[in-house]
């Protein structure tokens, strides 16, 4: 007999039900009458810990073996794996790097969802692995593959990802069991079983749709080419950008600028979005001076469209109150905790606004007095003043408090922080337009410095200080031989600022390019009384 077992390697992070998935597959195979064996391989991955489960199914019914028992393996052999199934994209690639899969044999089923590693979270810049690159690696090291957003399907079904994975495996056609066999093992009694069946169905339909699409594409490629009306209809369905954007900017920038306008209209109003468009128009005019034909894809304006929208929509207590009190947020919480209609759900939000948050909405003169008062307290060795709040968002009074605070957006343009932020934005914008008009590379590097602005509180302030120091001492410095040297210095300073939270790398880079290091900021010294030692007998 030359029939070989079908081998599967299942990879799941901690708490995702990898053991349950293995039990379902073993139970389904036995229910259908096929020999099966499974083993678990404990391990520790980059996140909460991953355990792999190895499964072999012999694709001949036990009744047809005439008393013979196939020998099934306990561990996957490199290059001889029939299927690799994983609930996380980077974990899938990690398993591929171990040599389990092969291009001429292995089917890979993976979720496109990401659970960021500690190393990715620690980066000041965007430390995430490139999702497109990870998908390319999977395609290059598999015979066939199915990449699906299983996190979204899990959320829709109100279950765990193991049920969706089971549906994907069943629809792949790899194993000889029928859909009814899987559903019989899952069962249909109880809310958890029903949720698992919903997740199974969503996973089954997702993989089935991809298989049908692949078959259709194969048929189309083998047939003579013909125009497709669906493509033209899909192109016409793309929403049109605002009139100002369509008339004033190249078509390659429309989508990004439209998103920026929508964000700022929601954040403040249409007048604020028009201010955003006017600022980008100044950047585009400067870029046309150094690159009239747009051979570089209007990259300076594109970068500014992204980072300018994020900076203009800076976080403040009004913004936080608005986000916390939205109906979509309540629905998201219900989905995360999997609350049923008969469940009682209470949601508490903890806030601790300090003097800077309150001063942000006050006029400049009052804000400076309030900040000076808090600064004097800190110089005296006291902690910064803050107001701890615990608001029950599920209550009428709590929701009303947040909604009233969110309605204060009209007060934002009159506040001290708004005025300060706009002045800093204009300083950065002026540097970008001036440098872009004279030397495209220098303007592009300054525009990319917008990625230094992120987070909130001290992180946000530190990012703005770093950006403005680069603008004032590198973008406007007269000691560079040419624009190329200036662009290289700005790029090096930006990368240094993103690589080191303490700023030591940035200071060293600034000195290497003839600029002063960042000035030291005075910090108060707080004396803490040493607690008395208890005498023991």
Image (cartoon, grey):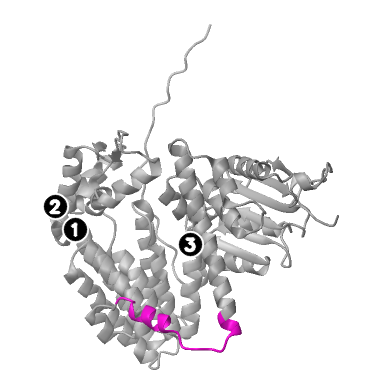
Comparing 284 with 427, the one in front is 284
Residue where numbered disc 1 is placed: 416
Determine the residue positioned at 45% across, 70% down. Answer: 515
Comparing 518 with 249, the one in front is 249
**Disc 3 and disc 1 in contact, CB within 8 angstroms:** no
Q: Residues within 10 Å of mark 3 (few under 14, many from 20)?
A: few
- Residue 126, labelled with which disc? 3
Q: Which secondary structure lies at badge 3?
A: loop
Residue 24 drawn above or below residue 472:
above
**Disc 1 and disc 2 in contact, CB within 8 angstroms:** yes
Residue where numbered disc 2 is placed: 366
Q: Tell me the distance, in whole angstroms, between the alpha carbons under discs 1 and 2.
A: 9 Å
1 or 2: tag closer to the N-terminus = 2
Magenta region, residue range: 220-239
Determine the residue positioned at 66% across, 69% down. Answer: 140
Q: Quick one: quadrant of the N terminus?
A: bottom right
Q: Tell me the distance, in whole angstroms, between the alpha carbons under discs 2 and 3.
A: 38 Å
Q: Which secondary structure lies at badge 2?
A: helix
Q: Residues within 10 Å of mark 1 (few under 14, many from 20)?
A: many
2 or 3: tag closer to the N-terminus = 3
Residue 419 drawn above or below residue 457:
below
């Amino acid at each position: 007999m030359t029939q070989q077992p079908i081998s599967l390697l299942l990879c799941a992070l901690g708490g995702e039900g990898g053991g349950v998935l293995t039990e379902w597959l073993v139970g389904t195979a036995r229910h259908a009458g096929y020999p099966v064996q499974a083993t678990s391989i404990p391990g520790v991955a980059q996140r909460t810990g991953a355990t792999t489960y190895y499964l072999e199914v012999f694709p001949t019914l036990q009744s047809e073996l005439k008393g013979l028992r196939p020998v099934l393996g306990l561990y996957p052999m490199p290059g001889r794996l029939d299927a690799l199934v994983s609930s996380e994209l980077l974990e899938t690639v990690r398993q591929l790097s171990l040599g389990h899969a092969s291009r001429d044999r292995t089917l890979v089923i993976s979720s496109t969802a990401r659970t960021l590693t500690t190393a990715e979270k620690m980066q000041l810049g965007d430390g995430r692995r490139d999702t497109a690159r990870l998908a390319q690696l999977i395609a290059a090291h598999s015979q066939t593959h199915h990449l699906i957003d299983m996190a979204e399907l899990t959320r829709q079904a109100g279950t765990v990802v193991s049920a969706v994975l089971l549906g994907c495996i069943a629809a792949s056609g790899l194993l000889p069991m029928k859909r009814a066999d899987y559903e019989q093992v899952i069962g249909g009694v109880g809310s958890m079983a029903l949720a698992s069946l919903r997740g199974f169905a969503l996973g089954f339909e997702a993989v089935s749709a991809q298989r049908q699409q692949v078959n259709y594409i194969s048929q189309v490629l083998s047939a003579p080419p013909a125009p497709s009306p669906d493509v033209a209809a899909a192109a016409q369905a793309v929403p049109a950008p605002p009139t100002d954007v369509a008339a004033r900017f190249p078509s390659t920038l429309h989508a990004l600028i439209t998103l920026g306008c929508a964000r700022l209209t929601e954040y403040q109003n249409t007048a604020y979005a028009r201010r955003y468009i006017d600022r980008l128009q100044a950047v585009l005019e400067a870029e046309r001076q150094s690159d009239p034909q747009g051979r570089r894809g209007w990259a300076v304006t594109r970068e500014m469209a992204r980072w300018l929208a994020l900076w203009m929509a800076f976080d403040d207590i009004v913004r936080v109150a608005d986000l916390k009190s939205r109906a979509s947020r309540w629905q998201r919480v219900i989905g995360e905790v999997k609350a049923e209609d008969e469940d009682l759900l209470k949601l508490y939000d903890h806030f601790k606004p300090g003097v800077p948050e309150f001063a942000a909405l006050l006029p400049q003169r009052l804000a400076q007095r309030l900040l000076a008062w808090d600064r004097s307290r800190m110089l005296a060795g006291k902690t910064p003043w803050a107001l701890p709040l615990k608001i029950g968002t599920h209550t009428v009074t709590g929701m009303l408090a947040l909604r009233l605070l969110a309605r204060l957006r009209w007060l934002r343009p009159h506040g001290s922080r708004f005025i300060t932020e706009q002045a800093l934005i204009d300083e950065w914008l002026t540097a970008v337009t001036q440098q872009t008009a004279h030397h495209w590379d220098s303007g592009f590097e300054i525009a990319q410095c917008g990625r230094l602005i992120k987070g909130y509180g001290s992180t946000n302030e530190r990012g703005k200080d770093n950006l403005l120091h680069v603008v004032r001492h590198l973008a406007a410095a007269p000691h560079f031989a040419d624009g190329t040297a200036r662009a290289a210095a700005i790029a090096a300073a930006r990368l240094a600022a993103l690589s080191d939270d303490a700023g030591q790398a940035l200071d060293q880079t600034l000195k290497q390019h003839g600029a002063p290091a960042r000035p030291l900021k005075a910090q108060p010294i707080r004396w803490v009384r040493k607690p008395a030692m208890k005498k023991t007998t």
